[in-house]
Amino acid sequence: MRILIGLALLGLLGCASTSSDDPAPTLRAGASKVKITPDHPGWMTGYGNRNHIADGVKTDLWVRALVLEGPAGKRLVLVTADLLGFPPKLSQSIRKEAVDRFGLDPADLMLVASHTHGGPAIPERPSMEIFHGLDEKTGQDVYEYADWLEDRVLEAISKAMVARKPATAMLTHAEAHFGMNRRFRNPNGSYAIKDNPEGLVDPDVLIVRVASDLGTPVATVYTYACHGTTLGGDIYQYHGDWIGYASDEIEKASGGAPALFATGCGADLNPSPRGKFEMAEAHGHAMAAAVAGAPPGTPLAGPFTSVLSTIDLPLAPPPERELLQKLAAEEVPPGKVSYRKRHATEMLKLLDAGKLPRAVPLPIQVWRLGDEKVVAFGGETCVEYALRTKKELGALHTWVIGYANMVPCYIPSEKVLSESGYEPGWEPGTKDTIATGSMMFYGWPVPFAPGIEARIMSEVERLAKD
């Protein structure tokens, strides 16, 4: 109890503004929080080994929205949600409605998923057919939830718009150290998902504290590069993983002001240790303590600008029909699941329809808030993109986000792509002839062709130019 009270006081002191030396309000800001826990049990996503629907709720799931309006009236809208990821069609539909309803430019809206593996299944990606074995009929509840979710996201944006008031925003940094690189090189040269203490990580926790002109907390934004995978596929209760616990504790410390987690580039990072709710709660507490203990920081100011583009990342040559036919005809023992058979069957359907994809669309978004740059990558972006982006654009004034706007698949660095394993979606035995691992589950026919990192970073440089 003493720890929680101490955190609450630290959080309030970090947000309150009582000194005559504090910056005068230069912004208008509003925030909101809307529950998105399914109202009846359905399929969960994040782990393919789950074989039945959810059986309860451990912690509620939320969508949170923050509107920042600059001195010239430009509005930037950040939405964070306790989801595995925003799939392409849902993201596009939300953006279109937000543009029409609120008069935003498309680039003014950023949708970020927390990447909890304790949330509901959503259509499209990961592939419902491959990952869950569902089709449009058996997965009807999944489509209905997505429609309901879109309304809740728009409701959160609307409430944040209405709540705008004069405000200040302070940007600061802290560190956390429970995120562990998970790409472990086996003696035979293959890669397993296992703690790798020598692997790359990004300990930076960037924090934005938004307060009204009276010093009342409006919102806290925080980011960290780490998966929402403390808990495994044996858990059938909806939960927000460590992020849910962190946001809840940060909100209690600030009198209920929404705490928005803008996920970092943690595609190849897992929380450590893993496996129990107590561990998720401990990681959440560690993050809340880091946020509460961070120094006051520096003011955020205008002008605001926003740009958003989508680039195509080429895939390797398509798989041979004979290979797909052979894999689709695989005999599967009763009671067993073959993701390979499901994948080959779906790829044959696309091939026969002339719709087999040759590239993956990836959104990249850049916001500027005065001197600060926010670079947001779509997809499950590996940590090297954050480290390289900060190095090239200037770590002091660059904030990097992953899982933004839509999550089509993992986005490996060139190094990770060359090494094989789950994240790049190929194995030495099959090489680039057919997708394995993550690329299979996300519904792509083959892994990426070499050269994607250079293509991505070239677009970042273009968008980030003054």
Image: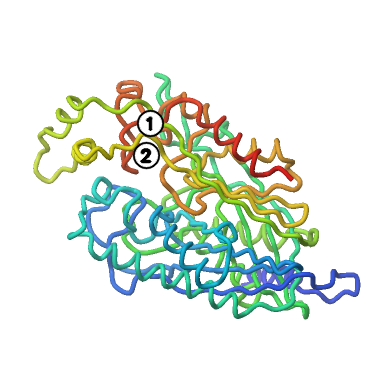
| Relative vertical location of residue 101 with respect to residue 307 in this rendering, above or below | below
Query: Which residue type carries mark 2?
Result: Ser
Direction from residue 144 to residue 207 in the image, left or right: right
Instruction: Please identify, in this view, whether the residue under mark 2 or under mark 1 is nearer the observer.
Output: 1
Quadrant assignment, res 140: bottom left
Tell me if I can see residue 228 in this picture: yes
Direction from residue 271 to residue 191 in the image, left or right: left
| Relative vertical location of residue 365 with respect to residue 168 in this rendering, above or below | above
Tell me if I can see residue 271 in this picture: no
Instruction: Name the residue: 61% across, 34% down.
Output: 458
Element under disc 2: helix
Real-space CA distance between mark 2 and mark 1, rounded to the nearest whole angstrom: 9 Å
Direction from residue 37 to residue 462 in the image, left or right: right
Please tell me which residue lies in front, 457 or 397: 457
Whole-percent x and y of residue 388? Answer: 64, 35
The quadrant of the image that shows the C terminus is: top right
Instruction: Name the residue: 62% across, 42% down.
Output: 202
Quadrant assignment, res 21: bottom right
Mark 2 Cα shell of 10 Å, populated few (<14), some (14-19), many (≥20)? some
Residue lying at the far top of the rendered structure: 188
Instruction: Name the residue: 70% across, 50% down.
Output: 373
Element under disc 1: loop
Query: Which residue type carries mark 1?
Result: Pro
Please tell me which residue lies in front, 187 or 423: 423
The residue beneath circle 2 is 438
Direction from residue 3 to residue 419 in the image, left or right: left
Mark 1 Cα shell of 10 Å, populated few (<14), some (14-19), many (≥20)? many
Whole-percent x and y of residue 61? Answer: 44, 67
The residue beneath circle 1 is 447
| Relative vertical location of residue 380 with respect to residue 110 in this rendering, above or below | above
Q: Earlier in the sequence, mark 2 or mark 1?
A: 2
The quadrant of the image that shows the N terminus is: bottom right
